Image (cartoon, rainbow, N blue to C red):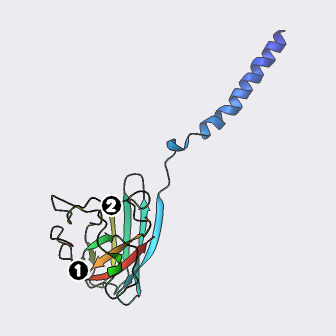
Amino acid sequence: MRTSLRSAVLASALALGLTAPVIAQDKPAQDKPAAPTTYDAPIVNNKGETIGKIALRDGANTLVMRVTIQAGGLPPGWHGIHFHAVGSCADTDKFQESKAHINHDNAKHGLLNPEGPDEGDLPNVYANADGSVNAEVSSDTPLTGEGGLKDNDGSALIIHANEDDHATQPIGNAGARIGCAVIK
């Protein structure tokens, strides 16, 4: 009887020892950090030529976007950039098919506006003397999900000819649309 009891205890211990690691590895999905959702897209100019790209990474707390423009891609200096409501760059002459900024809450334009910002507002980027840009900006606007950039009609990143003053309506005196990337 003592041997049977020992065998039963040993078998139980082995069974517990073998299943414990499996239980530890099978944590519920909410305990595991989600990998960021990523998206890349080319940036085109008013001639339809590719001048660079955007790389988006959407994490649990923010969206991070890298903007890379090749030499000669933009005029040197500061440029306003915004997320626009429709994912189209087909009308390369003016990029008007991208419509206005994403603005679900009907906020005023401008990162410095007390009644803003709207969801499309982003910091300016700087083009070097050779027209290249390497910048990284963040946004609270998600890539996917409700109110996200990849909704039914997508969205577009628009690059403007001038810098955004972050206050003047409707686009901060940023001027003409000279670059566009589709986000779908």
In this rendering, position of residue 128 left or right of residue 146: left
Q: Is residue 32 visible?
A: yes
Q: Is residue 79 above or below residue 148?
A: below
Q: Is residue 132 visible?
A: no
Mark 2: amino acid: Ser
Residue that label 2 marks:
139
Which quadrant would residue 135 be assigned to in this image? Answer: bottom left
Which quadrant would residue 67 be assigned to in this image? Answer: bottom left
Q: Residue furthest bottom?
A: 47
Q: Is residue 45 above or below residue 124?
A: below
Front: mark 2 or 1 = 2
Q: Quadrant of the N terminus?
A: top right
> Residue 31: where, in percent of width, then height?
51, 41
In this rendering, position of residue 143 left or right of residue 110: right
The local secondary structure at tag 2 comes to strand
Which quadrant would residue 89 be assigned to in this image? Answer: bottom left
Mark 1: amino acid: Gly
Give the residue displayed 32% in from the left and 61% down from the top: 139
Give the residue displayed 63% in from the left and 35% down from the top: 23
Q: Is residue 39 above or below residue 174?
A: above
> Residue 68: where, in percent of width, then height?
38, 75
How far apart are labels 2 and 1 at the CA level? 22 Å
In this rendering, position of residue 18 left or right of residue 136: right
Q: Quadrant of the C terminus?
A: bottom left
Instruction: Please state which of residues 139 and 118 is positioned toward the viewer in this rendering.
Output: 118
Q: Which mark is residue 23?
A: none
Determine crowd level at label 1: few under 14, some 14-19, many 20+ residues with C-alpha closer than 10 A.
some
The local secondary structure at tag 1 comes to strand
Q: Which mark is residue 77?
A: 1
